Image (cartoon, helix red, strand yellow):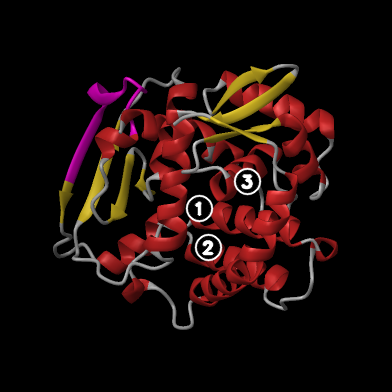
Amino acid sequence: MTSAAKGRADSEPDDATEPGAAPRPQSLLLSFFGIHVLGRGIAVSSASIIDILGRVGVGEDAVRSTLTRMVGRDLLDRQRVGRKAYFGLTERSDAVLRDGQQRVWRAGVVNQDWDGTWTVVGFSLPDAWRSERHDLRSRLLWGGLGPLQSGMWAAPGRVDVAALVAGLELEAHLKVFQGCAVAPTDAGTMVATAFDIPAIARRHEAFLVRWGSAAPVAGGDPLAAQLLLHTDWLDLVRRDPHLPVEYLPEDWPAVRAERVFRRLALRYEEPARLRAAEILDAVECGP
């Protein structure tokens, strides 16, 4: 659990892209490995990866430098077979990608069965600890918490904060509680205070603008389209705090955006798999 939390916080929140911006190479690589490598026990050649990311406009130098950084961050394992370099998942990236699958396919974009429980985190760090404060806030955002007031963050639901902050060595500076809101505190006001609901809605509306027309994308290449779609959607759901449906506006755009994603993901799945099978040069490995 500790390695999973560490991997999630280090690999994703700081790499989030602004809505509509070109996806970063690392995000695209994680999408590729999550779709075509996770659970298969294989490593794929650098040439295959360069080919596939080239289909979405990422140059060879950018791919190679990103692969090197990901190896250095324990997100990829590199092995040589003859003169070729092959890249596979590590325990850490395996956990990151499985968490992503959970968010995309099983968690849903809204919380339909919230029981009224809140997780509240209070913290106080020395003024000079800017880096530590940034890292902690990144972890809290990743866990679906939002700022209620200075030094107090909250999420509607049960969050495993110990796992979320593992490795930061800030436990002595945190106070964590779980319970329900009671009068005069109003749960709806807490949601509106901790989370920028209009901004969340705008991100989902932007996704609908990009993908809702179902027009051909990426030059008709299903593998490129699949990679862009999954990267865009995963970036979106990782920013979404999965709020209780009773505190969201009617016709919440996330619900429509999720339907569009699932429809297109199904459309691209088989042709993209066949295209990838033609391209991938792979060898067996773990995990």
Q: 215 and 151: which one is in front?
A: 215
Q: CA distance from mark 3 to mark 1?
A: 20 Å
Report the Cα–Cα distance between label 2 and label 3. 26 Å
Front of the two marks 2 and 3: 3
Q: Position of residue 71 (x, y in %)?
A: 59, 22
Instruction: Measuring from the top left, give residue 159's x and y in whole percent.
Output: 27, 47
Of the 4 image quadrants, the one containing the N terminus is: top left
| Residue 129 among those drawn in magenta | no
Identified by mark 3, the residue type is Phe
Q: Residue 167, relative to residue 221: is it above or below?
A: above
Q: CA distance from mark 2 to mark 1?
A: 8 Å
Q: Which mark is residue 32?
A: 3
Residue 132, position as x, y percentages in the image: 43, 23
Which element type, helix, strand or loop, lies under badge 3?
helix
Q: Which residue is mark 1?
A: 239
Q: Are marks 2 and 1 in contact (CB under 8 Å)?
A: yes
In the picture, measured across the screen, residue 132 lies left or right of residue 111, that is right
Q: Quadrant of the C terminus?
A: top left
Q: Residue at x 65, y 40 (%)?
A: 29
Residue 252 located left or right of residue 275:
left
Disc on res. 200 = 2
**Which of labels 2 and 1 is toward the front?**
1
From the viewer's perspective, tell me whether residue 173 is left or right of residue 225: left
**Which residues are drawn in magenta?**
165-177
Q: Position of residue 247 (x, y in %)?
A: 35, 72
